Image (cartoon, coloured by chain):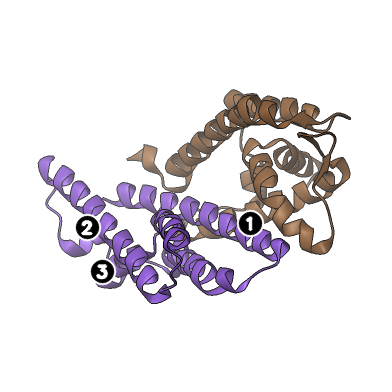
Amino acid sequence: MSWLILVAHAFNPLLLHIGMTRMRSRREASRRAVVAQDVFLTVFSSFLVYLVWLGVHWLWLSMVGAGLSFDRFVGADRGPAYFLPFMLGFLMLVLEFGVRPRLRAEQSLAFVGSLGTVLLVSGCYFMFVNYLAWIAYL
Amino acid sequence: MTTEHLFRFLIQSYLSPVLLLFYLFCAQGFLAPFGIRAFASTGTNSERLMGMVYLLVAPVIGFSWLMVSCGFLQSFDAGLSLPAILEGDIHWLQAVGFLVTAFVLRAYLSRNGVEANLMGFIFTPLLLFGAAISASLHFWWIWSVVLGGDSG
């Protein structure tokens, strides 16, 4: 379970949004369309940022003397609701790389844009509540 | 659900700065495919909020948000219910957020609407300020009531 939680954090909605925005501007600048590579870079960079974030917390907690096992630190037992923001992050990826490039009509693009904003805002909200719960649990 | 619950729900739907910001940024995208316009142009660079559309859509957004938030927070075993959430005390800082939203809405619903620069440099920062207050209070409530963070 801990490993699943660790990997799921690669789909953090906020980090994915930042990555996708960077990829979109890069794609528009170079006019190329290697979708698989862009998806991989977005998810992988999000995962790396999460590892740094986790490392900083680990360091901080080590300095205050809390002895934490890997399972306790990452979180061994989580309900399905915990993974909701990551599912939203995955949906954001599908919208950005799967749906958006196929749309031409302005209305459809605006609809997808609004849907993406809803996913991002609710994903960030869920992530932050999960973070507060994690801090309270540690 | 009593009349008081309904009243509190409507106040929070219409006057929440977070929901108004959400409406300003996202409503057009969702309503346009149905042929509904959330804004009307009143000049070269100004627009006005369509009052009737806001009146109908804001409670829908408010209720959706309440359901999503309450549904997600159920996973923390705090025994939350919709009436209990609506019965919560309104902090005076939250009332400031409501006043800010009312002030912005008054300008946005007026006959001449709001000029884009005025909206961007005055009203949106005001709304962001109100939204920051509301969000801080909401997360504080989650920390202390839902997660029991203040009881140790």
Same-chain status of marks 1 and 3? yes
The subunit carrying tag 3 is: A
* Viewer-closest of A96 and A14: A96
| Amino acid type, callout 3 | Ser
Q: Is residue B133 above or below residue A67?
A: above
Reading the image, the residue beneath label 2 is: A73
Instruction: Tell me which residue sits at (32%, 40%) in the image.
Output: B152
- Between the residue at mark 2 and the residue at mark 1, the CA separation in whole angstroms equals 36 Å
Residue corresponding to mark 3: A2
Dot 2 alpha-carbon crowd within 10 angstroms: few under 14, some 14 to 19, many 20 or more:
some
Q: CA distance from mark 1 to mark 3?
A: 33 Å
Q: Residue at x 36, y 64 (%)?
A: A42
* Residue at (69, 43) in percent of width and height: B24
- What amino acid is found at the position of numbered circle 2 in the picture? Phe
Tell me residue A34's x, y (percent).
Answer: 40, 74
Disc 1 marks a residue whose amino acid type is Ser
Where residue B100 appears, x then y in whole percent?
A: 67, 26
Left or right, A131 with respect to B13, comes to left
Chain letter for mark 1: A
Q: Residue furthest front?
A: A30
Q: Tell me the brown chain.
A: B
